[in-house]
Image: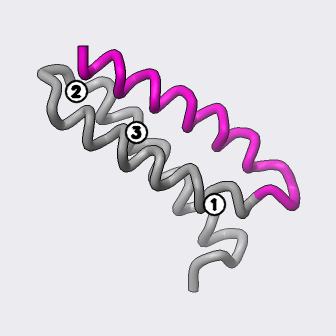
């Protein structure tokens, strides 16, 4: 059950991350990354790894987008 919750959080964060690739919406990554961290924490509780891995991917995409856009460093 926790894996399904983690996958749901991950898909919501992924859809928001895709929206954040539009110009002038890069600030949205500052909201997506904590959401994906919560999803990854829920994924750690579950037996499955799919939800955790999806959330880790979303975190990586968000951080890379922030680095490219100048939001970090």
**Residue 15 included in the magenta stretch of the image:** yes
The answer to which image quadrant residue 12 occupies is top right
CA separation in Å, label 1 and label 3: 15 Å
Question: Does residue 34 appear to the left or right of 71 in the view shown?
Answer: left
Question: Does residue 38 appear to the left or right of 64 in the view shown?
Answer: left
Percent x, y for residue 21?
75, 49
Determine contact: label 3, label 2, CB under 8 Å: no
Residue 22, which numbered label? Answer: none
The residue wearing badge 1 is 65
Percent x, y for residue 2?
24, 21
The residue wearing badge 2 is 49
SS for callout 2: loop
Residue drawn at (63%, 60%) of the image: 65
Determine contact: label 1, label 3, CB under 8 Å: no
Q: Quadrant of the C terminus?
A: bottom right
Bin the neighbour count of mark 3 within 10 Å (Cα to Cα): few under 14, some 14-19, many 20 and up: many
Say which label, 1 or 3, has the lower sequence index. 3
CA separation in Å, label 2 and label 1: 24 Å
SS for callout 1: helix
User: Mainly helix, strand or loop, the magenta region?
Assistant: helix
Q: Which residues are magenta?
A: 1-25
Percent x, y for residue 44?
18, 37
Q: State the residue in front, 35 or 68.
A: 35
Residue drawn at (27%, 20%) of the image: 3
Q: Nearer the viewer, mark 1 or mark 3?
A: 3
Percent x, y for residue 57?
43, 42
Question: Does residue 6 appear to the left or right of 64 in the view shown?
Answer: left
Q: Quadrant of the N terminus?
A: top left
The residue wearing badge 3 is 55
Question: Does residue 28 appear to the left or right of 39 in the view shown?
Answer: right
Bin the neighbour count of mark 2 within 10 Å (Cα to Cα): few under 14, some 14-19, many 20 and up: some
């Amino acid at each position: 059950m926790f894996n399904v919750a983690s996958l749901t959080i991950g898909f919501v964060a992924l859809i928001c991350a895709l929206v954040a690739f539009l110009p002038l919406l890069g600030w949205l990554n500052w909201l997506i990354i904590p959401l994906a961290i919560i999803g990854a924490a829920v994924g750690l509780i579950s037996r499955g790894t799919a939800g955790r891995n999806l959330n880790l991917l979303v975190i990586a995409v968000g951080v890379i987008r922030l680095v490219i856009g100048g939001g970090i460093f």
